[in-house]
Image (cartoon, helix red, strand yellow):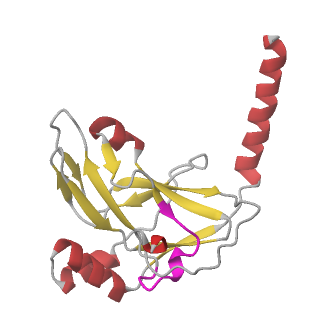
Amino acid sequence: VPTRGLSRQREVLRRAASCCIATDMQKIAKFEKVSKERFVKDYTGCFGCGEAEAARVYDGIKLPRRATKGSAGYAVFSTADIALEAGKGVKIPTGIRALIDDGWVLQIFPRSGLGFKYRLQLDNSVGIIDSDYSQSDNEGHIFIKITNDGKEGKSLTIAEGDGFAQGIFLPYGITVDDSAEAERNGGFGSTGK
């Protein structure tokens, strides 16, 4: 295979991709907060704090955002100060939900640096937020359960407001004989009943 032709093809693809990033990105979703009532109920249930503390946290929730125009991932920010010893985990109510167009899914991953330095893991490997999750009774409230899976005994500290996960929107397809008609109402395994 001539490398000269391959280099030319790669350059054409790089330019085409660059053009798409700058001008043709599809806007297919929107992040918003869940209601204050929903967040306070879920937050106090996870962390055992009072309603006034949960309301204070709610007022400071930051919606996910990309760091640069070339970033695929939307940083998801912690709603609590978290200290995780190696081998320990925690479930974090983020206070956010995603309104997503049909044919797209939001996948949640640990932030790359935290995964690399601490082996931070999502307990379900990859979080899958389907486009119909936002219509659930829980308002589509996104929870992220993480574990410090490091083998070196390093403790991990995440401050309230720090990014700890990232969400990436991806398109998906269905089979030609797909006949799914059920409607979602819930999260974490609600469609497997």
Relative to residue 93, is residue 21 drawn left or right? right
User: Residue 122, image x and y in percent?
Assistant: 35, 52
User: Residue 134, image x and y in percent?
Assistant: 52, 78
Is residue 125 positioned above or below 90 on the image? Answer: above
Which image quarter holds the N terminus? top right
Relative to residue 37, is residue 167 drawn left or right? right
Q: Is residue 147 magenta?
A: no
Task: Name the residue located 82 percent from the left edge and 13 percent from the top edge.
Answer: 4
User: Residue 5, image x and y in percent?
Assistant: 84, 17
User: Residue 183, image x and y in percent?
Assistant: 57, 81
Is residue 136 positioned above or below 142 on the image? Answer: below
Task: Name the residue located 42 percent from the left edge and 80 percent from the top edge.
Answer: 34
Magenta stretch bounds: 128-139
- The extreme bottom residue here reads 37
Relative to residue 125, is residue 82 drawn left or right? left
Task: Name the residue located 41 percent from the left edge and 82 percent from the top edge.
Answer: 138
Relative to residue 173, is residue 90 drawn left or right? left
Is residue 38 positioned above or below 69 on the image? Answer: below
Which image quarter holds the C terminus? bottom left
Q: Is residue 130 magenta?
A: yes
Q: Quadrant of residue 28?
A: bottom right
Total labels: the figure holds 0
Q: Quadrant of residue 15?
A: top right
- The extreme top residue here reads 2
Camera-side residue: 131 or 22?
131
Camera-side residue: 50 or 104?
104
Task: Name the residue located 15 percent from the left edge and 47 percent from the top edge.
Answer: 85
